[in-house]
Image (cartoon, helix red, strand yellow):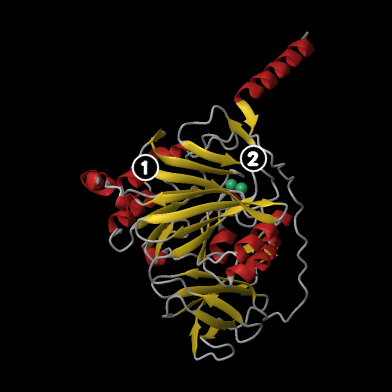
């Protein structure tokens, strides 16, 4: 009898599931997850720089980060505008960490600058190894961002990275879940080597996902590896934590929030966000963009409702400040909303884009809730990447490209007009002052 009841319940649950859940239907046959890449490390000198990546750090400065096995290797970057001619150099800081039986190499962070905008620089790390080349972002619009989250290090990651490499972009934005090291620390090293060709040539601005936490109760705090390796300009933006910060580039103010840092109204992150939003000058930076890991607007069955608490706490702040665009990851699929606020279509709300489809080992999240909510305009479960070209103070072109048999195929695109040009900001000026200045 018990078996019969169990069988009945199973059939009932399956039947219910088929009522509310369907797989998006179109002609495209979605690929399976691909295996993790095997990334061998051919032995080089222990002072040889590896895992080189760069990030923006205040006006006209770039942070160069790399790792050496040799703990006495110098933290020096030589750089210049011609190959092999380094007329400037800078010294920096180092850190390292241990994690159970693993000891990291020496992690170097060196600030270089002031640098000219929109210029190519050649540089070398630690006075040896290969020469790298970077391009600084432009001083003014237009600017192009590449966007892809939940990268991991599989065959699909490789495909996504090669497509990003082909697009002419200035800065990479990554809304969390980088290496999928998941406590196995050497996977952070293989990820660093995998992304080095791209991350050493354009600034990579990242925020944390759940795969970066790696805490062990009573033994290890969270984010030890992430914070050591992927240092972002939090101090430069008045934040006390690498888990949330902001930066300005061309005419865009970008805020990186932490889905895994406290976000309630009594938290440091909440106070910092209020202060940061009050500092935004839309005459100088007409576009306001926010990234975090766990989406607030998600009609995929994966991770349903996980962003609700953060949304409840922080969405009124973003709305009052007239945020144009919000990018999230976490759900391994793509979804773009209409302008939305408080779960209703609202011309003064933000466009929310979930882009957790970089190509990690966990595969795609292919099931959606039906009917599609009114705020959801486009959704598709494929691996891919996005390109955001902000053309001027009023117009931006967004496109999303799926990895279709290893070819980037544009699947979604839209022109987005800024809230600066919509009249929303002047209508909300009083609301902004009230919401943001209320203690
Ligand atoms: Fe995630
Ligand atoms: Fe993920």
Pick the residue in front: 400 or 14. Answer: 400
Q: Secondary structure under badge 2?
A: loop
Evaluate whether residue 107 shows in this view: no
Evaluate whether residue 386 shows in this view: yes
Q: Residue at x 44, y 59 (%)?
A: 241
Q: Reply above or below: 52 against 12.
A: below
Q: Residue at x 43, y 55 (%)?
A: 396
Q: Reply above or below: 319 against 134.
A: above
Q: Residue at x 52, y 81 (%)?
A: 121
Which mark is in front, 2 or 1? 1
**Distance Cα–Cα, label 2 vs label 1:** 26 Å
Query: What is the x, y in percent for residue 280?
Result: 30, 58
Q: Is mark 1 within 8 Å of ligand 1?
A: no
The residue that label 2 is drawn on is 365
Query: What is the x, y in percent for residue 107?
Result: 59, 72
Nearest to N terminus: mark 2 or mark 1: 1
The residue that label 1 is drawn on is 349
Query: What is the x, y in percent for residue 411?
Result: 59, 48
In the figure, is residue 436 to the left or right of 310? left
The image quarter in which residue 348 lies: top left
Marks 2 and 1: CB-CB under 8 Å? no
In the figure, is residue 413 to the left or right of 236? right
The image quarter in which residue 275 lies: bottom left
């Amino acid at each position: 009898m018990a078996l019969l009841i169990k069988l009945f319940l199973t059939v009932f649950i399956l039947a219910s599931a088929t009522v509310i859940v369907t797989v998006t239907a179109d002609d495209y046959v979605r690929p399976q997850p691909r295996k993790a890449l095997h990334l061998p490390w051919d032995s080089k000198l222990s002072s040889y720089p590896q895992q080189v990546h760069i990030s923006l750090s205040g006006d006209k400065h770039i942070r160069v980060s790399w790792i050496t096995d040799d703990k006495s290797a110098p933290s020096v970057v030589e750089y210049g505008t011609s190959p092999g001619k380094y007329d400037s150099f800078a010294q920096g800081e180092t850190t390292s960490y241990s994690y159970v039986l693993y000891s990291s190499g020496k992690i170097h962070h060196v600030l270089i600058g002031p640098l000219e905008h929109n210029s190519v620089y050649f540089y070398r790390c630690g006075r040896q190894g290969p020469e790298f080349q970077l391009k600084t972002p432009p001083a003014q619009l237009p600017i192009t961002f590449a966007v892809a989250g939940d990268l991991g290090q599989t065959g699909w990651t490789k495909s996504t990275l090669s497509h990003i490499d082909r697009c002419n972009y200035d800065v990479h934005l990554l809304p969390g879940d980088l290496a999928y090291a998941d406590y196995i620390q050497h996977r952070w090293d293989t990820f660093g080597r995998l992304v080095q060709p791209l991350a050493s040539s354009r600034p990579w601005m990242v925020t944390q996902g759940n795969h970066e936490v790696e805490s062990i109760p009573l033994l290890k705090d969270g984010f030890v590896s992430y914070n050591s390796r992927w240092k972002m300009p939090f101090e430069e933006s008045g934040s006390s934590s690498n888990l949330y910060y902001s930066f300005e580039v061309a005419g865009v103010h970008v805020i990186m929030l932490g889905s895994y840092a406290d976000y309630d109204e009594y938290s440091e992150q909440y106070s910092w966000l209020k202060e940061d939003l009050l500092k935004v000058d839309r005459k100088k930076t007409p576009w306001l963009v926010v990234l975090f890991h766990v989406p607030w607007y998600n009609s995929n069955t994966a991770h349903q409702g996980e962003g609700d608490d953060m949304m409840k706490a922080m969405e009124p702040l973003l709305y009052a400040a007239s945020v144009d665009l919000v990018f999230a990851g976490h759900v391994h699929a793509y979804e773009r909303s209409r302008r939305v606020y408080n779960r209703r279509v609202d011309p003064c709300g933000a466009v929310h884009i979930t882009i957790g489809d970089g190509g990690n080992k966990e595969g795609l999240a292919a099931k959606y809730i039906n009917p599609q909510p009114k705020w959801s305009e486009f959704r598709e479960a494929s691996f891919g990447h996005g390109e955001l070209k902000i053309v001027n103070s009023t117009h931006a072109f967004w496109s999303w490209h799926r990895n279709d048999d290893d070819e980037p195929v544009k699947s979604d695109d839209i022109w987005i007009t800024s809230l600066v040009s919509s009249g929303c900001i002047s209508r909300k000026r009083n609301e902004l002052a009230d919401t943001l200045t209320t203690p």
